[in-house]
Image (spheres, rainbow, N blue to C red):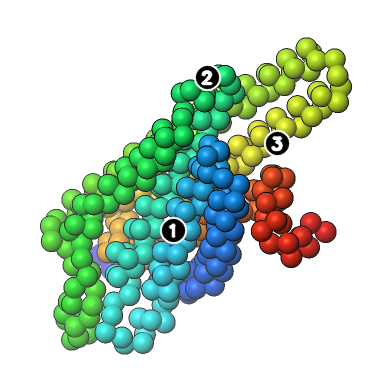
Amino acid sequence: MCALEIEVQFISNYAKSVIMFVIHVILDMSICVFGIAGNALNITVFRKQGLRNSVNLSLFAISISDLLGLIFQVWQNFCLNPYLEQADLPVDFFYIQVLTGGNPNVAMTRITGWITMYVTAERCLSVLTPFKVGLIVTFERRVLILFFCYGINLAFFFPFFANYYLDLSFIPELNKTKLGMSVRGDSEFLGFVINVGHIYLTIISFVVVIINTAILVVTLKWKSKWRQSATSNQNQQKALSSREKKTVMLVIMMATVLIACYCPGVVCTFLEIFYPAFGFNDKQQNVFHVTWSFCFLFNSINASINVIVYYKMSSKYRTTLFEIFPRLRVLER
């Protein structure tokens, strides 16, 4: 039995502390600081350009969810500093971060996924039905859709925040009372419901983004070939081809980053449901916490990298950015 116990301990407590310190305190914190600044720039630029434009409004909404998610992640990174456990403070930061950092961050991450799903769907409509998309998706409907993306993802966390709360708890092992997290109902059942909701909401956005991106890429390539064969002006052909390639590259980039960064979290959620030892307080809890640390790191990368994508691929974004911050023109050189 002892041998079995030793065999299943894949990551020691010491190794977990070292890995989580490197990920959360050094890597993730640095990415979050960059991402917060970048999303603040995005929000400023899109407001300057005007939110009546469908793309600007959607990217503005993504920037808000990414900004909020990164702020929650900064707090979570602070709470997951292993040295806080050794400081003998009257606060159990390891459990507090679940309620005040981890889950709010996951909610914002899912919201970004759903808005990306909407953006790709709207782009498909604009390519397939360019003369009808303005009638189908009005400004008011866009606002309602974006509110729906926020609302449906936040609603799935209501059971969690309704049943988990901050409370003083006595810890027999330490013979001390600390501020931590308590639960009113069945924690296992609540965890199962939250994980299932996370799977469905994430899988829906993943699948739809992939389908929409595939449709958009194929349609743009087909229209590009048709325009080249139907247009005699070579310069116009090149201009159309260039614009379409940039659009395709932007969509592919956003979809690829989204899928690559969110897949680890989805896999971990499946493991929690189908592998009982992989859980917050179960046999493989060290593996659980280390794995989720990497997942949160990828989420931070996804929330932070958009400013680079917009800057590199949108001349309109660069122009507006330099109008607001003229000193940043040094970046062009």
The residue carrying mark 2 is 132
Task: Classify the position of the N terminus by image quarter.
Answer: bottom left
Residue 96 locus on image (x, y percent): 30, 70
Residue name at image x 81 percent, y 23 percent: 237
> Looking at the image, is mark 2 or mark 1 earlier in the sequence?
1
Where disc 2 sits, the SS reads loop
Within-10-Å neighbours for mark 3: few <14, some 14–19, many 20+: few
Callout 3 touching callout 1 (CB < 8 Å): no
Residue 294 in the image: above or below residue 33: above
Marking on residue 69: 1
Residue name at image x 52 percent, y 33 percent: 120
Q: Quadrant of residue 129?
A: top right
Q: Alpha-carbon distance for marks 2 and 1?
A: 35 Å
- Amino acid marked by disc 2: Lys
Residue name at image x 20 percent, y 62 percent: 164
Residue 293 locus on image (x, y percent): 44, 62
Nearer the observer, 271 or 128 = 128
The residue carrying mark 3 is 246
> Looking at the image, is mark 3 or mark 1 earlier in the sequence?
1
Where disc 1 sits, the SS reads helix
Residue 171 in the image: above or below residue 181: below
- Amino acid marked by disc 1: Gly
Task: Classify the position of the C terminus by image quarter.
Answer: bottom right
- Amino acid marked by disc 3: Lys
Residue 237 in the image: above or below residue 297: above
**Is any part of residue 70 visible from this angle?**
yes
* In this rendering, the label closer to the viewer, 2 or 1: 2
Nearer the observer, 81 or 99 = 99
Residue 230 locus on image (x, y percent): 78, 12
Q: Alpha-carbon distance for marks 2 and 3?
A: 23 Å
> Looking at the image, is mark 2 or mark 3 earlier in the sequence?
2
